[in-house]
Image (tube, rainbow, N blue to C red):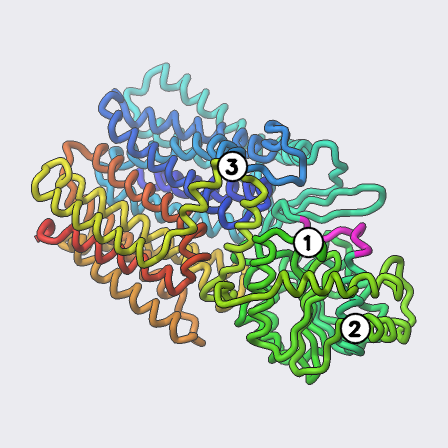
Amino acid sequence: MIFPLSAIGFAAVIVQILLLRELVTVFNGNELTYGISLMIWLAATGLGSFLAGKTSKYFKDPLKVLIYIELAISMLVPAEIYFARTSKVLFNIPAGSLPDLNSIFMITVISMAPACILFGILFTLGSKALADIGNMYIVESAGSVLGGIVFSFILIYFFDPFQIAGISGALLSMSAIYIYKNFIKPNTRSKTTRLVIFSLVLAVNIIFIYPFGAKLDAYSSQTQFKGLNLVKSVDSIYGRISVIEDKGAYSYFEGGALVFSTASVPENEETAHLAFLESRDPQKILLIGGGPAIIPEIIKHRIRKLDYVEFDPKLARLSGSVFPVIVTDGRYFIKHTSERYDLILINLGDPVNAVSGRFYTLEFMEQCRKKLAPGGVLAMKLSGSADFMRKETRTLNASIFKTLNLVFPEVIVIPGSYNYYFAADKRDILTDDANILVKRWKEKKIRTQYFNELSIPHIVSSDRLDYVKKAVRYDDKIMVNSDLHPISYLYSMQIWLSYFPGLANIPIQAILAVKLRALILWLFALAVIFKAASNRIKAIKDALTPAVVTLIGFTAMLLQLLTIYSFEALYGYIYYMIGILIAVFMGGLAAGSYISNNKLKQIRMDHVIALLFLSIAAFALYLHSAPELDLIPLFSFLFAALVGAFFPAAVRAYRSRNIENKAGVLYGCDLMGGAISAVLTSLLFMPVYGMIGTISVPICLCLISLVLLFQSSS
């Protein structure tokens, strides 16, 4: 029974990744949409587990119900992928535009909740089948580890989403057939008939693998961009890449966001040539991101060397660039290259999430300065305007401007199609004087379509410069953007939220206003009140274990996200390493739960929580020390192993009439805690409190858990 049940964890993690990737493309993903998607996934799974725990007593044969649900999921997932991909059309949202918060929530619920609820039910029924919740937790975690590894290193490279859905569905179908054939008795004619029907479901899933999956993928992709000429749509390891053609020009989208367009000649000319005018006569150039469309403008100058770094190899190939591409993470390259450059050009979009925000932090700017030759210039851009900028846009620009000024002795901003920021490693390098810039331009004798000696005086006119200088003026209230406190993507999120005023924004703005000290004090006060009430009211006393499970579920999700964010910030976004980090965490869950459930059955919840508290404190010291030695995977495994060890201990401590109720309540509470953590970590903790502030939250939750368990475990 163990091997077919492990298919549940295997399929669940694959379906989760598939749907999250689709929703990221639909929502042009930022941290808020990631958090909402994760929250709904975990909450719906927890709800399914809880409902199964309360209603399974009405099932005559729970094993048959498990089989039917496995088959139902196998048929449901392709429909959910199709809905997620075409949801903008169904909701009358134009392609390329952002959905509002209400639409995001509705689309996410419809896309994810049905399958998630069913997966939650499967956990409870699987616990009943194994007659051991701890072993089901181990089996599911082990299946999740394998599923994550297979998806990250095999499936994503060779199959499209509908084919992958067919593979996971076929696995669930085979699991159902195996269980039905070997564990359902007696062997009657109706049993044979049902096996035939189940085999037909398996055949449908195989057809999704080949040939129907590829055709449905192409059709749904075209529907997603209804009214536009989609010429190519493929999945890379980093997201879905779509190429739109319009009057001979091609626009490249990845994860729903525009990366570059061959039609953006004015912007490309402005970005490249302003940078060259500021850095005078650079010979060695480093270009990070933004696609190859800007390269023809760069090579019009007399340069000796251009290193072009792009993190997605498939995007580089699809663009048709004949220029050599260095395929790696830009931060990783900056940290490890021995080259010194006259000009470093960061040609990326705004810091809308934690990944893109890494290129606008204090630490990254310090690394860039070390890689500049004497007199070298760093150039980057942000969305803005010389005519009017909203308060949220001014705040983001002021934060990046302030951060640059802490690193470089000379920084200027020039308003054009974007706000262009130039930073030099010594003074008297940069200028915003129109006469000097025009003189330098005439000396270069370069042919362009739009950027010329007539456009330069307009770009750097005194009224435009005066406005943008006032707009980016900063004070102590404007926060510096750093690796350990990535405030830029909070400011970017506020820009995004400002586009959708209304009731949906009110709770989010209220959350963003919560102070860390006030949050911790309120949590401790509530814990003391809850503990005091448990001494008098039996119902509250019985709820102590589920409450602590919820807190540890919250802590587990926060720690998983925190280790991923800190790894990206310190060592770069390397796809296979992030996949390994997630696999390490899931493997730690399986290992810890196995040891607690089978080897150390005497271990109590408070013992595990105390060890978790010490390990988190050690991780906080590690982050404070500006580490050179990479111990993050080790910490990730340690956290997960302790969380995994906690769950069987909670199962032993929780008093319930039957195993289904135990599984439903505790697993449901675990996932509900994770759901709340997913949205609060991405929306509040990381952007507002930073990594150091955020790590104080799980430390406090461990202490609160120990308060709640005081005298209960002894």
User: Mark 1 packing: few (<14 Cα in 10 Å), some, or many (20+)?
Assistant: many
Q: Which residues are magenta?
A: 258-266
Q: Could you give the CA–CA distance between mark 2 and mark 1, rounded to whole angstroms?
A: 38 Å
Looking at the rendered structure, the kind of residue marked 1 is Leu
- Image quarter where the N terminus lies is top left
Report the side of 495 relative to 692 (left or right).
right
x and y, in percent, of residue 69 in the image: 39, 27
Q: Secondary structure at mark 3?
A: loop
Q: Are marks 2 and 3 in contact (CB under 8 Å)?
A: no
Q: Counting residues from the N terminus, which is met first, the one under dot 2 or under dot 1?
A: 1
Q: Is any atom of residue 211 visible in this view?
A: no
Which residue was labeled with disc 3? 502
Q: Tell whether position 225 is magenta.
A: no
Does any portion of residue 271 appear in the rendered image?
Answer: yes
Question: Which residue does the image show at 31% across and 53% down from the upper left?
Answer: 519
The CA distance from mark 1 to mark 3 is 37 Å
Q: Nearer the viewer, residue 112 or 133?
A: 112
Q: The residue under label 2 is which amino acid type?
A: Asp
* Label 2 – label 3 distance at C-alpha: 44 Å
Frontmost residue, 612 versus 376? 376
Give the residue number, with chain letter if any, for mark 2. Answer: 433
Q: Earlier in the sequence, mark 2 or mark 3?
A: 2
Q: Secondary structure at mark 2?
A: loop
- Closer to the eye: label 2 or 1: 2
Residue farthest toward the bottom in the current orientation of the protein = 374
Which sits in the foreground, 298 or 668?
298
Task: Look at mark 1 in the image and give the residue it sits on.
Answer: 315
